[in-house]
Image: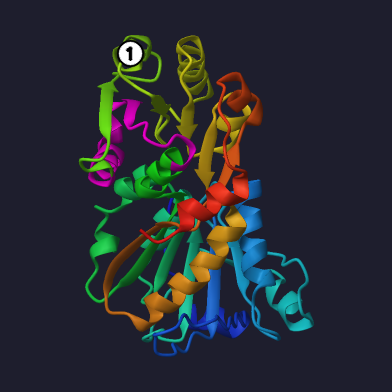
Amino acid sequence: MFLNFSGVALSALRAMVPAVLLLVMPPGLAQAALTRMTVLTGDNGAASAEFVRQLRETQAPGSQMQVFRLPADGTAVAAAPAAPAQEEQAANAGVRTRGLRSGGSSGDALTVAVGPDAARSAIDSDSREPLLLAMLSRLEFESLRASPGMRREGRRVAVLLRDPSMADQLALIDAALPQRRRLGVVATPESEPLLAELERAAGKQWTLQVSTAPDTKSIAPALRGVISGSDALMVLPDSIGDDQAATLAVLHAAAGAGLPVFGASEGMVRSGGLAAAVSTPAQLALQAQALGQKLAAGPAGVMVEAAHPASVRVNQNVARGLGLRLPDERELSDRVAAPR
C-alpha cells in the first residue's frame, strides 16, 4: 500500500497541523532551518511507539510535531500525541488525508517515515521535503533502493538502519572472544548484501565460514558445514534471524558443539545466544535527530547510516556454561562504540 499524494497539498496540511521541531545541530554543520516535522508510522508496535515517543520527548521547549499512522488501506490518519497542545488537539480533529504534497522547496521541513510500510508510502509521494527513512533493516532498504522515488532528481533522502554495522558486530565478537577469528555464518540467498558488508568488515583479520541454505527450513546441512571450522557462529539480521524456529535451530546446533552464538537481537540472547549488539528505538531516535540535520544541510542524494552506538546484551548463563568470563555489558558497549 502507498499514499496517493493527490488531493491534499502539503502546504494545506501544514496550515492545519503546526509541526515545529527544533533539533540539536551536530558540530561542524551549518544551521539548517528545520521548523516542521511530519512523522509517518506504519505500525502500532512497541518499537515504533518508543521511537516516536523519544522524538517527541527530545524536542526543544515549545516545539511540536505531528504523527500520522498508516493503516492497512494506505490512508494516513493523525495520531493523538502523548501530551497535545490545545491547538494541536484542534488540528487533529477529523484530519484524514490520502497523502502529503509539497508545492514549495520545503527547506524548513522534514518527513520521517518509521518502518518499511511508511517508507514505501513516503518514497512513492511527490513531496519535495527532505525524507528520513528510519527503523529499516538492511534488506528492507535494499528492497526499496531501486524505487524510482529514491532516484528522483533533487530529492534528499537519508536512511537510518535499525541494526548496527557488521564492523560493530565484529568488534563485539573480538571484545568477547579475543584472538578467536574463525566465524561461521549460515545465510539464505537474499542475504547477499549483508554477507558483502560482513566480508568488507572482516578483511584479512577474520576467517569466515559461510554456508548458504535454500530457505529457513533447510539450514541443517548448512550448519553442519560451518560448525567444525568455527570458533563462534553469527546469526544475521535476515530471514533466519527473523524466524524463531530457524534461530533456535542455529542455537541448538551451536550448543551441541559448544560454540557461542552472536547476533543482532535481544530475543536471540534471551533464547540462548551469548551476546548481541543492538540499538534501542530510543537510541535510534536520537541518531535520527542528528541525521535529519545532516540531511537538511546536505546536497541531494541518498545517505545511509547504520545504527550507532549499539548497546550490548549478554546472556551470562550461556557464558558460564561455555566457561567464558566476559566484561560487563557497559564495557562491551563502550568497546563496540569506540572509534576504529
The C terminus: image quadrant: bottom left
Residue 143 in view (yes/no): yes
Residue type at the position of mark 1: Ser
Image location of residue 213, percent across then percent down: 30, 19
Q: Residue at x 48, y 52 (%)?
A: 335
32 within the magenta span: no
Residue under circle 1? 228
**Badge 1, how many Cα within 10 Å: few under 14, some, many 20+?**
few
Q: Residue at x 66, y 47 (%)?
A: 46
Kind of element beneath mark 1: loop
On screen, 130 above or below 247?
below
Q: Which residues are magenta?
A: 175-201
Q: Residue at x 46, y 42 (%)?
A: 175
179 within the magenta span: yes
Image location of residue 76, percent across then percent down: 55, 60
Image location of residue 49, percent across then percent down: 65, 55
Q: Residue at x 40, y 54 (%)?
A: 120
On screen, 209 above or below 293?
above
Nearest to the observer: residue 145 or residue 16: 145
